[in-house]
Amino acid sequence: MSEAKPDQPHPLAGQRILFIHQNFPGQFVHLAQELVRLGCEVKALAIEKRPVPPGIDVRRYEVRPETVLPREDILSDIEVKTRRALACATAMRQLAAEGFQPSLIVAHPGWGESLFCKDVWPQAVLVAYGEFYYQADGADHAFDPEFSRATADSRMRLRLRNTALLHAYQAADAILCPTQWQRSCLPAEFQAKTAVIFDGVDTRVVRPEPGAFIRLGRSGLELRRQDSVLTFVNRNLEPYRGFHVFMRALPEILARNPRTHCVLVGEDSVSYGSPPRTHKNWRQAMLQEVGARLPRDRIHFVGRVPYADYLRMLQVSTCHAYLTYPFVLSWSCIEALAAGCRVVASDTEPVREVITHGRNGLLFDFFDVEGLARTVTQVLQDPSAYDPLAANAVREARAKYDLETVCKPEQVRWLASLLRPHTPA
């Protein structure tokens, strides 16, 4: 569908659009704002209270009672998601009673909320966000034998964990995936109706900044681009994002590079996987394992930081390490490329889609602690040799993943193609 001419309303103008995401706006933050700008009536259903872009009517609902069965119960996941779906359906019926009839629903099905969208509004076009479909083989399940192994029980549990997703994808008119690898994880029968468009990074903001600097905590230590800085970023410091591998390589990295400071961004909770059995969090567990060999004055755990501070940390980074299981690709990986980081990353499926070894970054085997230490050291000891990779990273991030010129326009065009042009009553 072609873009509207300047003197004509956009094809989506006037459409009623509903977003469903327990943490709205989540992945839909930029898309929702753009639809408001184009003249859509945008509403959202959510559970958690998060900052909301202007112009969007967000209705929050509660899931009661939220009684979770014991972790060992193979049916607990289905029960919890069904309760969430029922609570969301009640909120949808309330909107319908107020006269709101969406032409388009964009829903994240990961927690069950979208199960009954088509039962409340059968005529609405339903788009499901395809973040991750669990697989017994080839993805995160039993990828790291240190923490999990494949068994008949674990495979059966995983099959049932996909129950709500199967219902959501079957009911959906279309599916939106951020990467080709995430699309490839979907059952084959759903891939034909799946579009691959990344969420987008605003490369006007996420860009190299030679004059950037950071000031760290109580010490007041200032670090700039000309200093030797190693960065590592997770939402939470945990094995799914390779925190344990990174920490095991860190003593050798810092021993070989006595001027290097390491800045680690991330909290001590768990986003994916399980907490450690013997420690309060994974940071404590890994410091117990390797802390005696670490120069504590050159390691800086900064926790969760404001986005502007996080961005400056990328901009001063001499080398950025990114690790992940075969799982959802982090926004921070693309942001590190766009910020001009020299990225050393794990050679896992989602990473290979965006980083080519020797072109826009360097890859190493996820479990190769010595390989990580060696590769990072090569970058730290001769960073200018890897400037061409960083320059390529910036160019490719702008060309493939820029929010304003690539991703958001593609998302809007695709959504418009799913709807007939709106004709005012």
Image (cartoon, helix red, strand yellow):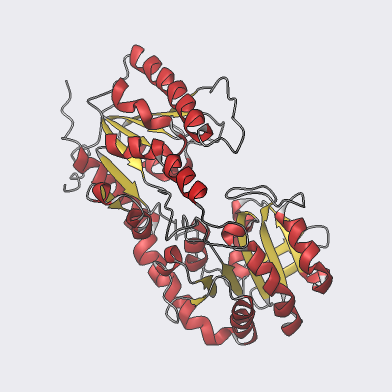
Q: Is residue 294 above or below residue 87?
A: below
- Residue drawn where x is 41% and y is 67% of the image: 354
Relative placement, left or right, of 17 versus 160 is left
Q: Considering the image in quadrants, where does the C terminus appear?
A: top left
Relative placement, left or right, of 280 versus 81 is right
Does residue 178 show up?
yes
Q: Position of residue 205 (x, y in %)?
A: 49, 58
Q: Is residue 260 above or below residue 178?
A: below
- Residue drawn where x is 22% and y is 25% of the image: 123
- Residue drawn where x is 66% and y is 52% of the image: 305
Between 379 and 120, the one nearer to me in the picture? 120
- Residue drawn where x is 35% and y is 26% of the image: 116
* Total numbered badges shown on the rendered structure: 0
Does residue 221 show up?
no
Judged from this view, the residue extending furthest toward the front is 152
Q: Position of residue 35 (x, y in %)?
A: 33, 38
Q: Position of residue 266 (x, y in %)?
A: 66, 55
Q: Is residue 374 above or below residue 408?
A: below
Please tell me in which quadrant of the rendered image residue 214 appears: bottom right
Between 37 and 408, the one nearer to me in the picture? 408
Q: Position of residue 227 (x, y in %)?
A: 69, 77
